[in-house]
Image: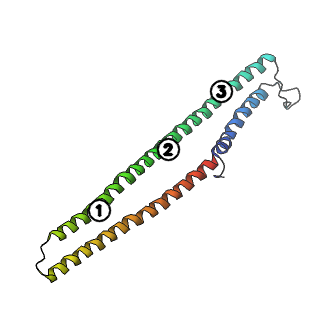
Amino acid sequence: SDEQPTGWRLRRALAPTLAAVLLMGATALLANMPVPKGGAAVLSLVATSVGENKAMIHANMKKLYKLETVVNDHKFAAYLHRAGIEENRDLILNNYDAAFRGNRKLANLNTDKIFENREAILGALPAADRVQQNWVLSMTNEAKVDYLDHRSKLNSLLPEVSHMMAEANSQLIAVNLRI
């Protein structure tokens, strides 16, 4: 099943190839056996001569060497793929860290500065009478509500993103347990 480790899937995938290589060696061995008088070949894995046996052993060694090369090529490809995945993960984490530190800091700073500027502008307005003074105070309160609303939205993003990161960490822990 897909839940088996990659090594098991690779072994299962290569098992028919290995069996075929070994069977080819056995078939070649049987094909070189003499047919006795009267009929069918005797099933025996003994070569007719030491030289034939040695030649078949060398042929099997050559096939096993080729199979080992294929297996090692697959291993190399798997490690290369894994290295690419780890490099991408590291880049994602670096981008996340830069975005969190830089963008969030800028968003916080801009939010604070916008409120300070609105407050300064409203505070610099001349108020000739009580109605104008009340209007300035009302606009200052409205600016404070806008500031607190925006600050609240910025704050609410942090737990959401933190929860997503915690889920990603849980998945990485699950991957680590499967290794």
Q: Residue furthest right?
A: 38
Of residue 53 and residue 67, the one placed in the foreground of this image is 67
Q: Secondary structure at mark 3?
A: helix
Dot 1 corresponds to which residue? Answer: 112
Q: Residues within 10 Å of mark 1 (few under 14, many from 20)?
A: some
Q: Secondary structure at mark 2?
A: helix
In three-dimensional space, the C-alpha distance between marks 2 and 1, rounded to whole angstroms, equals 39 Å
Of residue 111 and residue 127, the one placed in the foreground of this image is 127
Image quadrant holding the C terminus, namely top right
Measured from the top left, where is residue 145 in percent x and y? 30, 73
Dot 3 corresponds to which residue? Answer: 65
Image vertical order of residue 25 relative to residue 154, above or below: above
Of residue 88 and residue 120, the one placed in the foreground of this image is 120
Q: Residue furthest left?
A: 128
Q: Amino acid at mark 1?
A: Asp
Q: Secondary structure at mark 1?
A: helix
Dot 2 corresponds to which residue? Answer: 85
Image vertical order of residue 163 relative to residue 5, above or below: below
Going from N to C along the chain, the mark reached first, 3 or 2, is 3
Q: Residues within 10 Å of mark 3 (few under 14, many from 20)?
A: few
In three-dimensional space, the C-alpha distance between marks 1 and 3, rounded to whole angstroms, equals 69 Å
